[in-house]
Image: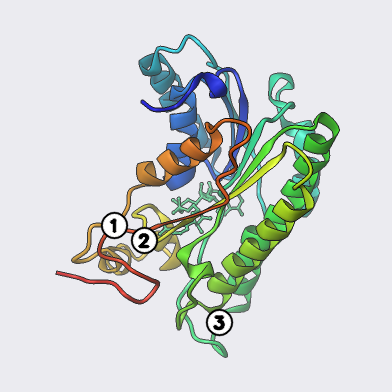
Amino acid sequence: MWTTKLLHDKVVLVTGASSGIGAATATLFARAGANVVLTARRTDKLAEVCRACEEANRAGQTGKGGRYAAVSLDMTNTEQVNKVLTLLPEWGRDVDVLVNNAGLAVGTDRVGDVKPDAIDRMLNTNVHGLIHITQQLVREFKARNSGHIINLGSIAGVNAYPGGSVYCASKAALHSFTTALRMELVDTPIRVSEIQPGMVETEFSLVRYRGDQSAADKVYEGIEPLTAEDIAEEVVWAASRKPHVNVADVLILPTNQASSYHVSRK
Ligand SMILES: NC(=O)c1ccc[n+]([C@@H]2O[C@H](COP(=O)([O-])OP(=O)(O)OC[C@H]3O[C@@H](n4cnc5c(N)ncnc54)[C@H](OP(=O)(O)O)[C@@H]3O)[C@@H](O)[C@H]2O)c1
C-alpha cells in the first residue's frame, strides 16, 4: 500500500460512513493507521463499518490508530450539525481530516415535477449540512493552524444533465464553496480538496430510485462502474500527501464514461 506514515494516529471524521464511498474510505483510513470517527443516521450500519475498520487496521499492520467511533448525525438537522464537536469522543475532537461525503440524489424528475421533499433532502444534506459542519471544523483548523477538508463532489457538478437539476446544482454549489474556501485558506497550512467521481456502484442509485432495485441496476447495465474502494483510494491518497502538496480537484471516471452523458455501454 502506498500510504505514508503521515496518516498514523491522525483523527479522520467521515460523514456518511454507513455505506458506499464513506464506509470504504473509513476502512481504508483505518488500514493506513488513522483513528476514524464515522457519522451517519444508520448507527447499526456504522457499527458494522467500525468492525470492518478494526479488521482493516489489523491487516494494515501499522500498529497505529485503532480507535473508531460511530456517531449518529443527520446532516439535515442543523442544530445537531452545529454541535457536532460535542458529540465526538474526547480522542476524536482534534480532527485532522474532515471527509464531507454524506450526500444523495432523490429522483430523476424534471423541473416542475421535482417533489418538494426531494429538493429539501438534496439541498439540506449536500449543501446546507456540508457548509454547517465545515464551518465548525474550519474554526478548529484555523485555531490549530492545521487540517484538511476533503469534499465529495461529482461529475454532476461539472456537467449537469436532464432529470438531475437539483442534484447537479447541489454538487455545483459544493464545487464553488470548495473553491472559495481553498482561496480563503491559501495563506495557511490547511488544505482543501475535492474528489469528483463519475458512476460508482453503491447504494446511491437505490436511494435515488427510492428502493427500486431493478431501476438502480439499470444505471450500471453494460458498463463497469467505479467501486467505492476506487474512490476511497483517491481520498486516502489525497490525505496522505506531504504537507506542501494539496490535491485540489480530482475527476475520476469509469473508463467507459467520459462525461455525465457520454457513456459507452456494451
Ligand atoms: N455513487 C455515485 O455514482 C457517486 C458519484 C459521484 C459522487 N457521489 C457522492 O458520493 C457521496 C457518497 O455517496 P455513495 O455513492 O457512497 O452513496 P451511498 O452508498 O448511498 O452512501 C451515502 C451516505 O450518505 C449518508 N447520508 C445520506 N443522507 C444523510 C443525512 N441526512 N445525514 C447523514 N448522512 C446521510 C448515508 O448514511 P445514512 O443513510 O445512514 O444516514 C450514507 O452513508 C455522496 O456525496 C454522493 O453524492 C456518488
| Residue 45 vertical placement versus 173 (above, below) | above
Instruction: Tell me which residue sits at (57%, 79%) in the image.
Output: 115
Between 149 and 120, the one lying in front of the other is 149
Q: Amino acid at mark 3?
A: Val
Q: Secondary structure at mark 2?
A: loop
Q: Secondary structure at mark 1?
A: loop
Q: Amino acid at mark 2?
A: Met
Alpha-carbon span between mark 2 and mark 1: 6 Å
Quarter of the image where the N terminus is located = top left
| Residue 178 vertical placement versus 3 (above, below) | below
Cβ–Cβ below 8 Å for labels 3 and 1? no
Cβ–Cβ below 8 Å for labels 2 and 3? no
Instruction: Tell me which residue sits at (28%, 72%) in the image.
Output: 263
Note whether ligand 1 is within 8 Å of mark 2: yes
Question: Which label belongs to residue 114?
Answer: 3
Q: Secondary structure at mark 3?
A: loop
| Residue 229 vertical placement versus 7 (above, below) | below
Residue positioned most to the left? 266
Cβ–Cβ below 8 Å for labels 2 and 1? yes
**Residue 121 visible at all:** no
Residue 249, image x and y in percent? 54, 54
| Total numbered badges shown on the rendered structure | 3
Q: Which residue is mark 2?
A: 199
Note whether ligand 1 is within 8 Å of mark 1: yes
**Residue 82 visible at all:** yes
- Specify whether 140 is left or right of 43: right
Alpha-carbon span between mark 2 and mark 3: 22 Å
Instruction: Tell me which residue sits at (55%, 18%) in the image.
Output: 8
Instruction: Tell me which residue sits at (54%, 70%) in the image.
Output: 167
Between 161 and 122, the one lying in front of the other is 161
Q: Which residue is mark 1?
A: 225
Q: Earlier in the sequence, mark 3 or mark 1?
A: 3
